[in-house]
Image: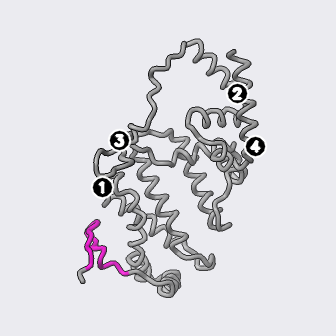
Amino acid sequence: MARHKVEICGVNTADIKVLNNEEMILLFQEYQKGNQQAKEELIAGNLKLVLSILRKYNNRTDNMDDLFQVGCIGLIKAIDNFDLAHEVKFSTYAVPMILGEIKRYLRDNNSVRIARSIKDLAYKVSKLKEQLTMEFGKEPSVSLLSEKLGIAEYEVVMALDSLKESISMFEPIYNDGGDVIYLCDQLEDKTGKNYSWEDRLSLKEALGLLKEKERYVIQSRYLYGKTQMELSEELGISQAQISRLEKSGIDRIKKKIL
């Protein structure tokens, strides 16, 4: 039976060899002794790992060849830094690094521009997050990242949010074979709601008087639609604490504008 052939960057995916765990260990042992041929075999034997990650980006970009090459850069970095002493599967270690390279590429080539200072902070946060995930075997909490970097928790969340991909308003979200429903079809039109400039100014001043966490909770809840449970997980505090921060923030705003 003929195998399905897919060409990416001149590579016939049907001919890609997949290494088993024993082969991987032997090749890593050889590479760490300085055998460059072993490194080439490790790269060739893990290309399908890159391709499996690229599947989720099929509808996000016109140039999959570029993303494949970027993913291979992440794969090479993972091979160069992998340590057999960690006793984890190579794929477990490599996937976050490959994803990180792809996301950085998409972010840097995104039409939505992000401030350099936020990009730099996002890089530090994501790098530390990868290190701690490897060390503890699970993703670190926002509070731990905040403590390690010496920054506020809301700055950690803001940096991580900046790494998320932007989605077109015309992204198809449902298709039953008939009319396609796009993301913009699900967005509420609030242009009919008008507020006076006095109200806007008072609200802006009131938000400026809030404590950092109160302001972040209020903005996240009422501007970005996040739930208290989502904020609880992001900030590493209980839902009850989120509720108290939201209530105290609203009370402060009411005293200012009412």
Q: Residue at x 33, y 51 (%)?
A: 176
Please provide percent x and percent y for residue 79.
Answer: 49, 73
Q: Residue at x 74, y 47 (%)?
A: 238
Q: Nearer the viewer, residue 123 or 55?
A: 55
Label 4, label 2: how many angstroms apart (C-alpha)?
A: 15 Å
> Do callouts 2 and 3 mark residues in contact (Cβ within 8 Å)?
no
Label 2, label 1: how many angstroms apart (C-alpha)?
A: 47 Å
Label 4, label 3: how many angstroms apart (C-alpha)?
A: 37 Å
Residue 170 numbered tag:
3
Label 2, label 3: how many angstroms apart (C-alpha)?
A: 35 Å
Quarter holding the N terminus is bottom left
Label 1, label 3: how many angstroms apart (C-alpha)?
A: 19 Å
Q: Nearer the viewer, residue 10 or 142?
A: 142
Please provide percent x and percent y for residue 113.
Answer: 44, 39
Between disc 1 and disc 3, the foreground one is 3
Q: Secondary structure at mark 3?
A: loop
Residue that carries the numbered disc 2 in the rendered image: 250
Q: Quadrant of residue 203?
A: top right
Q: Is residue 248 left or right of residue 225?
A: right
Q: Is residue 175 left or right of residue 166?
A: left
Q: Nearer the viewer, residue 101 or 141?
A: 141
Residue that carries the numbered disc 4 in the rendered image: 240
Of the two numbered discs 4 and 2 on the same chain, state the one appearing first in sequence.
4
Amino acid identity at mark 2: Ile
> Do callouts 1 and 3 mark residues in contact (Cβ within 8 Å)?
no
Residue range corresponding to the magenta coloring: 3-17
Mark 2 Cα shell of 10 Å, populated few (<14), some (14-19), many (≥20): some
Amino acid identity at mark 3: Phe
Check the image and report above or below for 198 versus 47.
above
